[in-house]
Image (cartoon, rainbow, N blue to C red):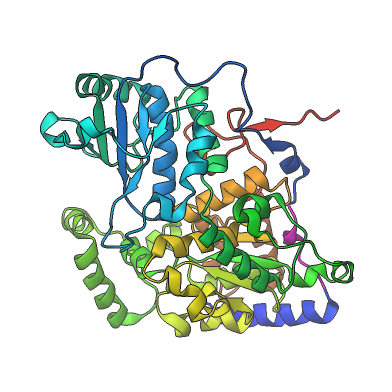
Amino acid sequence: MYGRLLNLASTALAEKERKQEKSGFWEEPYQEASVWKPCADKKYSEKIGNSGKRNGYISISANGGLNQQRVAICNSVALASLLNATLVLPRFLYSNVWKDPSQFGDIYQEEYFMNIMKEDIEIVKDLPSHLKSIDIEALGSLITDADIPKEAKPIDYLEKVLPLLLQSGVVHFLGFGNRLGFDPLPSKLQRLRCKCNFHGLKFVPKIQQIASLLIRRIRKYELAQSMLDKQLLGNFMPSSPSKKHDTTRSSSRYLALHLRFEVDMIAYSLCDFGGGENEKRELQAYRESHFPLLIERLRNSKLVSSSELRKQGRCPLTPEEAALVLAGLGFKRGTYIYLAGSHIYGGKSRMKPFTRLYPNLVTKETLLTPSELAPFKNFSSQLAALDFIACATADVFAMTDSGSQLSSLVSGFRTYYGDGRAPTLRPNKKRLAGILSENKTLEWNSFEDRIRKMIQEGQRVRVRGFGRSIYRQPRCPECMCKKILW
């Protein structure tokens, strides 16, 4: 689709190499980014947790993959505080999509989590014996997503759930996906969410150790320890570099890219990606198999054309579009790029336009040996944790879909612990579609200028807006503290 622009990009990158020009997007463009500091774990003179007798026990079975489960855990912490309940250590539902039997203790450090949160809420590993044998569904204490609206407010839980909790002493949330809104919410509950996400959830040593090995191989040697390294790698942090490496530090920098171009994403989008009738049949078969509700909805609605979907910014970025954005930002051909995520739809042939511009593309599968990856085989959430760490600790993190949970949580983590030195690149897909629609006539200098302005606009330092995810945008008084500049 973009052969002409790709050729112009190749020429431009060769010229930058010859002139030894550097991209300015390795650094945060706005100084205000360093004003905000982590403080969700700040100790208060008045305890947040309610004193006295608890109202009962809350247990949850979180659905989805690693990142959806993480959000559910943090929401359950806030909910336990709201209802003055004891939280049972969350469990994870087995999904036919993710096919991962991992439980909380396989991914996160249980004792650490319970210890960090104990000042705010009470957490136990299991229900007491007298409640274990109770038929929760028969009691009417089983709550599904159908019982609680999306983005529910505290009043929904106080009116619908608290009476059940007081009556039976226990409620169980089956699913609990996206069932607690971001606003309006008392500030103490917002702070608990932040404390849980940014301080309470530490990956287990098994994940930290392999992630540290992965990052050392991406960087090619040890680098100075950042706050992001410390928080995510724990005792397995790479050691400080020797002086002889200081002058070559720039050669070890890497960009992490979350390219959301997996079959589920593109099938659900209903967009056309130039693969002809074979692609259309393949994606339709996938929809019928995996998205029956989408198929039902399509039967009862007018189909929007692929070109219109693309204009509206609703189509996933293709690998060639992602490569063009990076080239427009001035990243050199030799840039070391870590590719996060699952298998790209179309495989190597689909990635060819990308790797022609950026051949130094690596994944966890290419950097780790089969024996090193063996303990994680068939555990997709644990593999996703490696991607999470590699993206969060990268010198630059680039996403193609700001709506994905991984991109959202990683960018929030980089904001919280990055100290204003962890740039994130977030394209505006609607604006990008408008730029790329002129690909037959657009000159490269104009393309570069418009791409850079688009990305810089997305990097502006903003305080979290009403209703926005506190996990993605932690710059707010409940989560971070703002330094006073004199």
**Which region is colored magenta?**
21-28
Q: Residue at x 57, y 35 (%)?
A: 464
Identify the main secondary structure in magenta: loop
Residue situated in front as seen by the camera: 438 or 54: 54
Residue 330 in the figure: left or right of residue 416 = right
> Magenta stretch: residue 274 in it?
no
Q: Is residue 99 above or below residue 190?
A: below
Q: Residue furthest left?
A: 138
Q: Position of residue 374 (x, y in %)?
A: 44, 75
Q: Residue at x 57, y 41 (%)?
A: 199
Residue 204 in the figure: left or right of residue 222 = left
Residue 335 in the figure: left or right of residue 53 = right
- Residue 5, visible in the rendered structure: no
Q: Position of residue 49 (x, y in %)?
A: 47, 21
Residue 78 in the figure: left or right of residue 283 = right
> Magenta stretch: residue 22 in it?
yes
Q: Residue furthest front?
A: 129
